[in-house]
Image (cartoon, grey):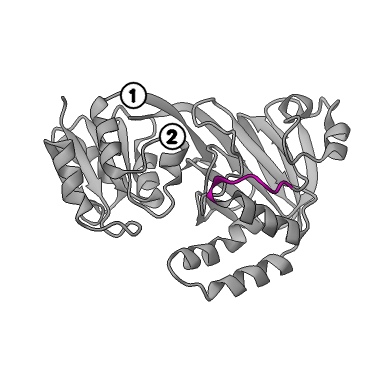
Amino acid sequence: MKRGLLIFNEKAGAQNRDVFPAIHATLGDVAMVSFEELGKPERAYACARELGCEWIAVAGGDGTIGAIAGSLVGSDLPLGLIPVGTYNNFARSLHVPLDPIDACRRILAQELHLVDVGLANGQPFFECLGIGLDAAIFPAGEAIKSGGFQRWFDLLQLGFQYPRHDFTMTFDRPVEDALCHNTANESRRLVRRLAGSRERTISLSALMVTVSNGPYYGMNFAVAPDERMDDGLFTVSVFHRFSKWQLASHYRSISQGRREYSPKGIAFRVANLSLTSSDDAPVHFDGTVAGQLPLEIECRHGALSVF
């Protein structure tokens, strides 16, 4: 078996540090470097080559794994995922075992899979890109994840005061062809209005828009539960007619992968789109608030090799 490089983040999630020696022992003859020692994620490829490694495994949470994965897009080095974070959305989306040792055994099997990568103005994302309320509340959500439960009040207050945005989206195909039919939360009135449209541009007022490359993001929110990371398409969800109470109930129900509550919305399936709004709506990439509108968003099919 070819030698690999193990990059690990001891600060990830709630895992005990004892798990990292066990991971090393299971993987066998691998070089090891901590995420802190690496310095910049962009050094991962060069570091692996300097050490004579033919693949990279990352033991960390979604932030660590996503950072290294972003540096390997389009490269010839495969990536192995070892989830030791809090939510592990990347691993869940690819059906990687959530037990770190079982994930190591999957890597040792050396079965390659090609997965899609989202690019927004050239910046990669793997789980979800969100615009509007979603991006505005993410900092509070991260504080809650880190134990800042006092931020719940701040999150709720922001959510109920947040204004709608006027979004304009242009798809790579006619609206009629992009439209998802018979989804659990579709707005039938809006679906009927758009069903015959051969236009490629649509304008809607909404609290937020999400562009999903995988089914999960954030606190295991299953915003696009049927989304796959290898089909070359995004699911674009427009939270069009949600009241803020409905939106809060929706997120409560879809957390941890549940689907019980489905207020009215609309979804599209596309490979590329451009998106803008009438004002300066905030943007997040996999939970990192960054970037600004307008956005040119592309699904790069099979651009990352994973075990």
What is the magenta range? 256-262
Give the amino acid type for the residue marked by disc 1 in the picture: Leu
Residue 257 is covered by the magenta coloring: yes
User: What's the residue at 34%, 36% (across, down)?
Assistant: 72
User: What's the residue at 25%, 33% (across, down)?
Assistant: 105
Give the amino acid type for the residue marked by disc 2 in the picture: Leu
The one nearer the camera, 271 or 59, is 59
The one nearer the camera, 274 or 130, is 130
Question: In the rendered image of this protein, does residue 296 appear above or below residue 246?
Answer: above
The one nearer the camera, 210 or 215, is 215
Q: CA distance from mark 2 to mark 1?
A: 12 Å
- Left or right of 71: which side holds 180? right
Question: Horizontal and vertical percent for residue 204?
Answer: 79, 46
The one nearer the camera, 52 or 162, is 162
Dot in front, 2 or 1: 2
Q: Which residue is mark 1?
A: 112
Marker disc for residue 10: none
Instruction: Give the image quarter of residue 16.
Output: bottom left
Question: Horizontal and vertical percent for residue 239?
Answer: 73, 48
Element class at badge 1: loop
